Amino acid sequence: MKYMKIAITSYGEDLSSKADKSFGRAKWFILVDTETGAFKAHSNEQNVNAAQGAGIQAAQNVANLGAEAVLTGNVGPNAFRTLNATSIGIFIIKGDVTVQQALSEWKEGKLQETSGSTIEGQWA
């Protein structure tokens, strides 16, 4: 499947920002149009300190943005189920990289798509 809109978890608002390893509590989602290269930062502030439900709410927000795939370091079971239910692909970022580096690795086929959560839920 060819993905055109990719959401990348990030600590900052641009492509040179460090990619965030957390999905549900990531500070930002950088939505990139892979055809045009255009990108826009979307705050995830409401979920950063959420008592519970951050993964589900973040997944719903990413779906509402029109993302077709997510690049992140980890995804919990609730976020995975929510993303999976909306057919959003989940690719795992390895190592300390910028958003741009993660995107490049994804384009080169170096990021593996996950078929399940990579961490236990916060309350598991």
Image (spheres, rainbow, N blue to C red):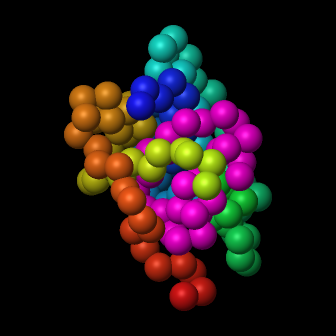
Instruction: Please state the extent of the stretch shown in magenta in the rendering.
Output: 60-84
Q: Is residue 14 visible?
A: no
Question: Residue most toward the top?
Answer: 36
Magenta segment: does it hold 80? yes
Residue 116 lies, with reference to residue 3, above or below; the image says: below
Residue located 47% across and 45% down the image: 89
Question: Residue most toward the right?
Answer: 46
Question: Residue most toward the bottom?
Answer: 124
Q: Is residue 35 visible?
A: yes
Q: Nearer the viewer, residue 51 or 92?
A: 92
- Residue 30 figure quarter: top right
| Residue 107 picture location, percent across and down | 32, 28
Residue located 51% across and 11% down the image: 36
Residue 72 lies, with reference to residue 41, above or below; the image says: below
- Taking 102 as reference, is 66 left or right? right
| Residue 86 picture location, percent across and down | 63, 48
Residue 104 lies, with reference to residue 10, above or below; the image says: above
| Residue 8 picture location, percent across and down | 50, 41
Residue 20 lies, with reference to residue 122, above or below; the image says: above
User: Image quadrant for the C terminus?
Assistant: bottom right
Magenta segment: does it hold 83? yes
Residue located 41% across and 31% down the image: 1
| Residue 20 picture location, percent across and down | 46, 53
